[in-house]
Amino acid sequence: MADQAPEEGAKKKRTFRKFTYRGVDLDQLLDMKQEALMDLMHSRAKRRFKRGLRRKPQALIKKLRKAKKETPPNEKPACVKTHLRNMIIVPEE
């Protein structure tokens, strides 16, 4: 028969969830400039970025960049511990 059921041993291909933020794909978010990205954010986040980041948030961003830099290609970066619960993480390459 032409309509055979898939074999039990065969694995089906896994589909990954596509990340979007307010209707904008991740690839487009990475290509955006800071000002265009701020237009997508809510007013509290805009205000925080407009006023600048203090010492602790800058240190966190530095740790995140270091962890990402030390990661081999196509691997997930190591976890970065932080107590900055209200820090806004923006996508960057």
Image (spheres, rainbow, N blue to C red):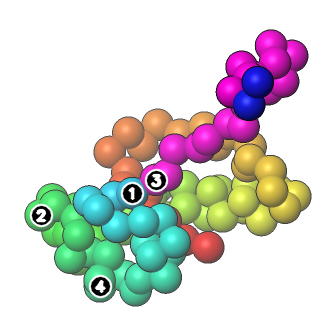
Where is residue 51? Give x, y as percent. Answer: 23, 74
**Inter-mark Cα distance, 3 to 4:** 21 Å
The range drawn in magenta is: 3-19
Read off the residue under disc 1: 20
> In the rendering, which numbered label is found on residue 43?
2
**Inter-mark Cα distance, 2 to 4:** 13 Å
Where is residue 62? Give x, y as percent. Answer: 61, 64
Labels 3 and 4: the sequence-earlier one = 3
Q: Secondary structure at mark 2?
A: helix
Read off the residue under disc 3: 19
Q: Verify CB contact (< 8 Å) between mark 3 and mark 4.
A: no
Q: What residue is drawn where x is 49% and y is 82%?
A: 31
Q: What residue is drawn where x is 32% and y is 76%?
A: 37
Q: Verify CB contact (< 8 Å) between mark 3 and mark 2.
A: no
| Image-quadrant location for residue 86 | top left
Q: Is residue 37 above or below residue 71?
A: below
Q: Is residue 49 above or below residue 35?
A: above
Going by the image, does 62 lie left or right of 86? right
- Quarter of the image with the C terminus is bottom right
The amino acid type found where label 2 is placed reads Ser
